[in-house]
Amino acid sequence: MVDIFKRYIEYWRSISTLNSTLVSDFSVSLAPNKDKVYLLGGKDAWVYYVGLNTWSSFVSRMERCGHTSTMLTDGNLVFIGGYTCSGPSSLIPMTQINVYNSYTSTWTSPQIKGNTFPSARIYHSAIVMNKNNIFICGGQDGKVQPFQVYMGSEELQEMTAVLDTDTWTWRIPKLSYLNQPYPQSYATIALVNTTKLVFGFGINYHTVQDKFHVFDTVTETWQETSFSRSKNAVWIENSSDVVASSMNQRIIWIILGCIGGALILLYSIAVWNFGYRKLNQTFFKSMTFIKREIWKPRVGEPGWAETARLILKFMFLLLFMYLIFTLSNQVIHSPVIDQLSFETSPDMTIDVPDIKFCFDGLETVPYIRCTTDFGTQCTDYIQPSLSCLVFQAPDSFKLGQTTSRLQSNGSFLKFDYYTEEKQTQVDSQQIQIELFHTLYNNSNSYSYYSVPFGQTDTIHYQIMKRVRLIPGGIWNYIGVSPFTEPHYELETILTTDYFSTRHDPSSGSPEPLGSLQIVPISIETRVYREQKAFAWINAMVYNLVYLGIDHDPHGVTYIDGHLGT
C-alpha cells in the first residue's frame, strides 16, 4: 500500500496499488523534476508517474536489497551498499556501484577509486550534499540478528563516508568524537539550508535513537547539537572527600612523630650543653621560680588569705577536670550520624554493576547481546555461571555522560535476549535479574527482579558508598582522621515498557525475548560518611565558650571580662 501526503492542503491520498513480488528491503528515489518516483529492490524495478497515478516496470540489471538509491541532479540514480538478496551475509562491496540514467534508461558501473574505502554495509542512509557528492552514514554488517555489528561501534571512522560522483572517489570525513552519531541503522537523513545534513532516529538493536545530529557539508564535520558544560566552567571538588582517610591518618602520625622527635632532640641538646647535674640544678631552680610565682602573699596580708586563693584555684581546677570528664563521657557515648556528600571521578565516569541473568521456563540458556548507546560491544563480558549468565565488565569499562565519548564507553548499557526455542508457556517463563556492585562480594546481591518475557525493562542505578567507623579507634572520638572502612551498595529503580520487535521465523534468526537497559541515575557516587555527633573538637570549643573566652572584632582577647595577654 502506498499513500501520498499533500503538504499544502495537509491530507493523505492513496495511489494505485503496485502488484509485484518486491522484497521488503527496497529503496525509493524522486526524479530531479519530481514527476516520477523510482522503486527498486531485488530484481524488481518500478517507476511511479505522479501525474498519471500509474506504475510501470523497467529493466533492472542488478540484484540488491538493503541498499540506498540516490538521485543526482543530472538524472543518474546511484545504488550503494546492500546485499545480493540471497542473504544478508552476501554483502556488496562499496567499490561495486550501479548507476541508472533516468533520462536514457541505461545502466553503468563506474570504476571506484579512493585511498580508503568504507566498509560494506546494509540499512544505511544516503543523501546528495553539495556538488553531487553523496554522503552515507550508519548501517550494519550482514550478520543476522542479534549478531549484527553497527558501523562505528568498533571504529568511529567507519560511520560516515563521502562519494565524489565527478571522479567516483571515496573519502572519509574528519572524525568528531563528541558530536558524531551513535551507531544505528534505518536512520532518517535530510538536507537543511543547503549546507546542513540532519541525521538520526535510527535503530540500534531494539532501541530507537531519540537524538538527531547535524553534519556541515562545507567543513565536512559534525556540529554540536546539545548543551554541554562551558569550557570556562571549573569543577570544584571537596578536598576532604578526595583525600583518603588512610592518607590523613598517616599525615597525623608523621606530624606527631616529628613533634616527639623534636622534643627528644631538644632534651639531648640541653644535656649535651649543660650536663646532667647542671640540668637537674636548672630544673630545681625552675621549680623554685614557679613556687615564687604561685605563692605571692600580699604585703600585710595573713598567710591564710593566700592559702584560700590557692584552694579556690584548686577547686576551679577540679571543676575543670570534672567538666573534662563529663564531656569525655558524652563523647564516648555520643551517637553515630551519617554525613551526606557526593564524589565524582576526574573523568566524569562511573562504574557499571555486575549483572546476573537466570531464565525460568527454558530448557536452554538464551543468547544475550550487550552493547552501549555509543555502540561499544560488551557481549564478550557475559560468561556462563551454572544455568545462568553473568555480565562482569573490567575496571576500564565505564559509563558517563553523552558528551564524554572519549572518557567512557557509553551512557547506558543495553541487553537483548534471544532464544531458538519455540515459545509456548509464556506465563511460566521469566527472567531473574540480580545486580551487584563490582567492589563487593558477589555472593550478596543488592537488587533482585523477576520480570516476564516480551517487554523492555529499564533499571536505573545509583552507587552508594558507606564509610563506616571502625569500633575502638581513638581518632574516632577526637574527630580528626577517624579509622573508617568503605562499603559499597546499589540503589535501583525498575521501570517497564512494552517490547515490540520484528521477527521472521523463516529467516533462521533467534526469536527475541526481551530487552534490558541499565542506566546510571547520576555519575556521582552518593557517600554516607559515619561520624560521632559529638567529638573532642566539639568539646574543646564548648570549653572555650564555657570558660568565657571571647574575641572582639578588633582581635583583642578577653577572659572573664579582663584583657588577656
Image (cartoon, rainbow, N blue to C red):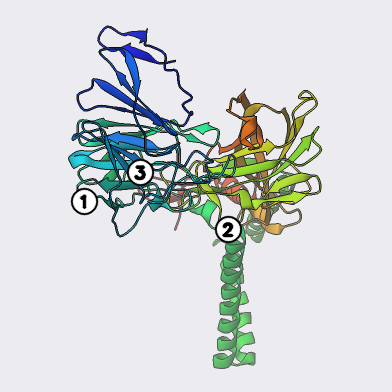
- Residue at image position (54%, 58%) is 243
User: Reading the chain from its start, which is encountered first: label 1 or label 3?
Assistant: 1
Q: Regarding mark 1 in the picture, which secondary structure is present there?
A: loop
Is 562 drawn above or below residue 46 in the view shown? below
Residue beneath disc 1: 167
* Numbered mark located on residue 179 in the image: 3
Q: At which x and y percent is residue 429?
A: 77, 29
The amino acid type, in three-letter code, at marker 3 is Asn
Is 429 drawn above or below residue 441 in the view shown? above
User: Reading the chain from its start, which is encountered first: label 2 or label 3?
Assistant: 3
- Residue at image position (33%, 51%) is 175
Badges 2 and 3: C-beta atoms under 8 Å apart?
Answer: no
Is 326 drawn above or below residue 503 in the view shown? below
The amino acid type, in three-letter code, at marker 2 is Ala
Q: At which x and y percent is residue 51?
A: 25, 13
User: Reading the chain from its start, which is encountered first: label 1 or label 2?
Assistant: 1
The amino acid type, in three-letter code, at marker 1 is Thr
Relative to 63, 502 lies left or right: right
135, 277: nearer the viewer: 135
- Residue at image position (18%, 41%) is 131
Residue beneath disc 2: 244
Q: Quadrant of residue 422?
A: top right
